[in-house]
Image (tube, grey):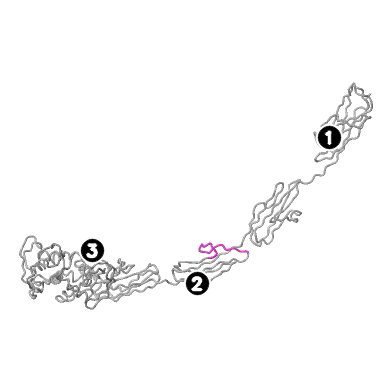
């Protein structure tokens, strides 16, 4: 980029001291758009309309103007090898005009730049040749060769760069430009208000540009004349999600562009273009507590072309937190502990509140799905109205029964608090209720009655029943004995038989004992099984060597689990 050389540095320094501007020196920092100065605004030096007015002067007009100046350009002629297709001798006025037409640039901008850079409108001394060689300061750097030597080369390429910088950098409102402050040599970052001023600082990155402005004003009048004026913008937060922008109508404007950033240094984004005479805009769907920065510029569309005025001073607004209401209600069978009606700033938090059920009831949930009885709503973004729901409490009754009996109901039961439920206990045949434990404690009434009733249930309970076999009453038995003969010879058989009553069943054992009349000792002779009729029999063969005499036979039945023992009468018989 072209840099200011020694010839103009002293002018830039004193002008910087004389000009008021908002800057941060030292470290490179962003600078807010300044208020519009009545005489000179270093961030709004020239309007787009003035910048692009390539037809503002004809070649004859330029020559006439130069003739009124004392500098060398009024009579300067050189070989032009760049503005046409073949080399030809042309006057300075012709070269200036042809370059302006080639790049759609106002010839007055070129003339002001020639004076700013090399004083070629007024100077007349022995250094003219050197000044003409670097007329626009284009590609001229300290201790470096001249990139575009020669007057025609300088004018043509200087116009090319000035016009090109206004287009190629894609300027947007708030777009930062790094410059050197002429008075101090320190760097700063500025935000030019329009693309043309941005191009001037790109061409000569020194702050301020008042020398160009002074030259232009001196010879051609106000570079902002006829341009759309700067919009006077106000920004007011209207809710926690919206900001309203408003401005007075700008004469000649056919619409307005609204640009926004979220920091003072940008980057700005165009969020809307209003049409017609609209002088307000509501920016919605914003985030509460965030600072938003706005600038607005007027636009004018005529003849198919659109031009823009300078950006307004930046205004910022913070969508302030709105007030939201929190309303808590207790449903039937419960109350609330805490403040039921609250007001909080949007984004803030309410105080804790608890749903308390009445006796015999339980908390179920809030009707917005919150399942904890105690709640505290935080980061509130809208009104909240909720109700606590309660339900009657339930209790579990858990029955159990051991073997050889039942309890009914036999499975766990759920009952409402305050209700009652009866359990019936029944032993199996041959068994009785041995014990009933209610919540682990023996209950004699339940053992005796075979039932237990839980009344006014307010908690979980258990009931457990056990059973035992009934004690048996053993039946007495009567055992008889008889024989088929009373006298028996040795070598013969005598048959004893009898019955047992009541019938103890098929296969009950009867033992037959025999003793000699001369002895008191009974000797087991045989063990016999009863028949299904309760009858038994035993055949006893008398050996040939058996002693003769009187003998006795007796039947015996041993005690069983169901019957008592019995002994028959003695049956006498004689062995002869």
Disc 3 + disc 1, Cβ < 8 Å: no
User: Are the two marked residues, 3 and 2, in contact with CB atoms closer than 8 angstroms?
Assistant: no
Work out which quarter of the rendered image holds the C terminus and state it: top right
Horizontal placement of 437 versus 209: left or right?
A: right
Residue 534, disc: 1
Percent coordinates x, y for residue 296 in the rendering: 29, 71
Q: Quadrant of residue 13?
A: bottom left
Q: From the viewer's perspective, is 504 left or right of 130?
A: right
Report the front residue among 400 and 5: 5
Which residue does the numbered mark 3 point to in the structure image? 169
Which callout, 3 or 2, points to the residue nearer the camera?
3
The residue positioned 65% from the left and 56% from the top of the image is: 397
Give coordinates of residue 170: x percent, y percent. Answer: 24, 64
- Describe residue 267's horizontal placement relative to residue 65 as left or right: right
> In this picture, which residue range is highlighted in magenta?
360-374
The quarter of the picture where residue 189 lies is: bottom left
Camera-nearest label, 3 or 1: 3
Q: Which comes sooner in the sequence, label 3 or label 1?
A: 3
- Name the element at disc 2: strand
Name the residue that disc number 2 marks: 342
Q: Looking at the image, is mark 2 or mark 1 nearer the viewer?
A: 2
Count the numbered circles shown.
3
């Amino acid at each position: 980029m072209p840099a200011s050389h020694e010839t103009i540095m002293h002018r830039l320094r004193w002008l910087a001291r004389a000009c008021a501007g908002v800057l941060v020196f030292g470290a490179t920092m962003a600078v807010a758009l300044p208020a519009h100065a009545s005489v000179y605004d270093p961030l709004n030096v020239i309007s787009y309309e003035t910048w692009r007015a390539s037809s503002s002067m004809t070649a004859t007009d330029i020559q006439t103007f130069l003739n009124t100046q004392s500098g060398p350009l009024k009579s300067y002629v050189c070989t032009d090898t760049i503005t046409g297709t073949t080399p030809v001798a042309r006057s300075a006025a012709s070269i200036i005009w042809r370059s302006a037409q080639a790049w759609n640039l106002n010839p007055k901008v070129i003339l002001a730049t020639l004076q700013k850079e090399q004083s070629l409108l007024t100077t007349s001394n022995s250094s003219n040749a050197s000044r003409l060689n670097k007329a626009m300061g284009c590609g001229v750097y300290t201790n470096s060769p001249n990139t575009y030597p020669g007057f025609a080369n300088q004018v043509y390429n200087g116009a090319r760069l000035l016009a090109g910088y206004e287009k190629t950098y894609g300027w947007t409102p708030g777009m930062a430009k790094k410059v050197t402050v002429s008075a101090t040599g320190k760097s700063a970052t500025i935000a030019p208000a329009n693309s043309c001023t941005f191009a001037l600082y790109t061409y000569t990155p020194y702050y301020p540009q008042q020398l160009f402005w002074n030259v232009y004003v001196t010879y051609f009048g106000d570079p902002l004349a006829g341009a759309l004026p700067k919009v006077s913008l106000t920004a007011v937060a209207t809710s926690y999600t919206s900001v309203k922008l408003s401005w007075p109508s700008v004469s000649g404007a056919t619409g307005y562009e609204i640009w926004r950033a979220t920091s003072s240094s940008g980057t700005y984004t165009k969020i809307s273009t209003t049409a017609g005479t609209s002088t307000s805009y509501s920016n919605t769907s914003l985030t509460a507590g965030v600072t938003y920065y706005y600038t607005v510029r007027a636009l004018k569309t005529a003849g198919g072309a659109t031009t823009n005025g300078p950006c307004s001073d930046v205004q910022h607004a913070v969508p302030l937190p709105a007030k939201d209401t929190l309303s808590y209600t207790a449903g039937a069978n419960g109350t609330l502990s805490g403040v039921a009606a609250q007001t909080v700033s949007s984004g803030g938090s309410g105080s804790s509140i608890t749903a308390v059920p009445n006796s015999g009831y339980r908390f179920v949930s809030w009707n917005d799905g919150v399942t904890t009885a105690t709640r505290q709503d935080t980061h509130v973004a809208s009104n909240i109205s909720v109700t606590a729901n309660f339900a009657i409490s339930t209790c579990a009754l858990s029955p159990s029964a051991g073997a050889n009996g039942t309890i009914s109901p036999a499975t766990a039961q759920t009952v409402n608090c305050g209700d009652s439920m009866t359990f019936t206990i029944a032993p199996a045949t041959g068994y009785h209720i041995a014990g009933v434990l209610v919540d682990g404690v023996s209950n004699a009434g339940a053992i005796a009655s075979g039932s237990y009733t839980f009344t006014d249930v307010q908690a979980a309970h258990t009931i457990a029943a056990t059973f035992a076999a009934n004690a048996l009453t053993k039946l007495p038995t009567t055992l008889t004995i008889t024989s088929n003969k009373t006298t028996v010879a040795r070598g013969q058989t005598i048959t004893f038989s009898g019955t047992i009553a009541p019938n103890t069943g098929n296969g009950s054992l009867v033992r037959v004992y025999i003793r000699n009349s001369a002895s008191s000792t009974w000797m087991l002779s045989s063990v016999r099984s009863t028949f299904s009729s309760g009858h038994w029999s035993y055949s006893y063969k008398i050996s040939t060597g058996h002693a003769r005499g009187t003998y006795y036979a007796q039947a015996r039945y041993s005690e069983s689990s169901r019957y008592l023992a019995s002994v028959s009468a003695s049956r006498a018989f004689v062995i002869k």
